[in-house]
Amino acid sequence: MNEAGRHDHRGTIFVEQGEILAHEAHPGDQYVLRVHAPRAARTARAGSFAHVRCAASLPMRRPLSLMRADAEAGWLEILYKAVGEGTRLLAERRVGETLDLMAPIGTPFSPDPGRPRALLLGGGVGLPPMVFLADQLRRQEGFHPIAFLGSEVPFPFPTRPSTILLPQLPDGVIACMPQLEDWGVPSRLASLQGYPGCHDGYVTDLARIWLDALDETARAEVTLFACGPEPMLAAAAALARDYGLPGQLSLEEYMACAVGGCAGCVVEIITPEGPAMKRVCVDGPVFTAESVAAFRAPA
């Protein structure tokens, strides 16, 4: 990174004391949190995240992906799973309380108007950025997003049969995310848990079936976007490589400061100048699929 770009994030990250507007519990210790943070909401983009102080007793913040933002109403929405001390304390917070957060942080996704078929793959805690990206793309003329979402715990929303036909997919794979369906964005769900209407496998399996059904011209319009656990991202990178698709991956790493100071979240990225250690928090979390050293094809 050049000297001028080293501090690009300054002046774009806001610290806000936001009122909790809604806090809904879902199966699998999952929660959807809506917080009033008008400055952050104006500039948040799909792929960016918030660094949240979960409780007054915990000085260390927790990085949480943004699922939606409403610039006009001034709120951010976060889907998270309570898995440790911080997020379990966050789950106890109530509507009307004040939440200390820093947002938006990180390099977001960069859709290409020249490739309007956006293939969105989200797994587990990787669902929120895909929902945000779908919301963003449906508002931009010319884009045609499609989302395949996977989870091994109950989905944090009531599923329903889709009314948007996807004849490329196997019969019976009809479960969708209602929010996306209401936006007109086709979606299908995948799980190994036998949930009704879901594909019995991985989201990358569904993506291969869908891509195989496209002709060469249509496939040349596809960009792959993915967020999820590391094995899923590795599979998504392989998928992009196999089909010759540009891909963008949102990585997940432990973060202490989340603003690039501690360098505790570095990963190896292949740049035009050679391998370099990049910070997931501010240099990412979104990187091109072919640049992530851990996901490249063996030499």
Image (spheres, rainbow, N blue to C red):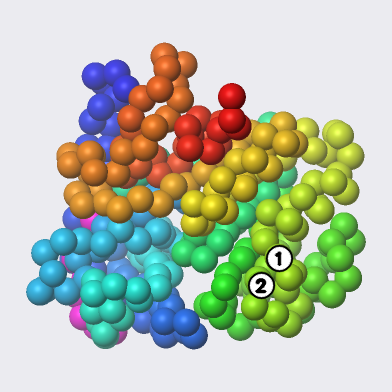
| Viewer can see residue 103 | no
Q: Residue 275: percent from the left, percent from the top?
A: 40, 22
- Highlighted range, magenta: 95-103
Quadrant including the N terminus: top left
Query: Three-letter amino acid code at disc 2?
Result: Leu
15 relative to 202 in the view: left or right: left
> Mark 2: few, some, or many residues within 10 Å (few <14, many ≥20)?
some
The residue shown at (64%, 34%) is: 246
| Viewer can see residue 204 | yes
Viewer-nearest residue: 157 or 29: 29
The residue shown at (36%, 25%) is: 276
Q: Is residue 1 above or below residue 285?
A: above
- Predominant secondary structure in magenta? strand
55 relative to 202 in the view: left or right: left
**First reached walking from the N terminus: tag 1 or tag 2:** 2
Quadrant including the C terminus: top right
Q: Is residue 29 above or below residue 192?
A: below
- Residue denoted by label 1: 201
The residue shown at (13%, 69%) is: 58
Viewer-nearest residue: 211 or 165: 211
Badge 2 marks a residue whose secondary structure is loop
Residue that extends furthest to the top in the rendered view of this protein: 273
Marks 1 & 2, CB-CB < 8 Å contact: yes
User: What's the mark number on residue 192?
Assistant: 2
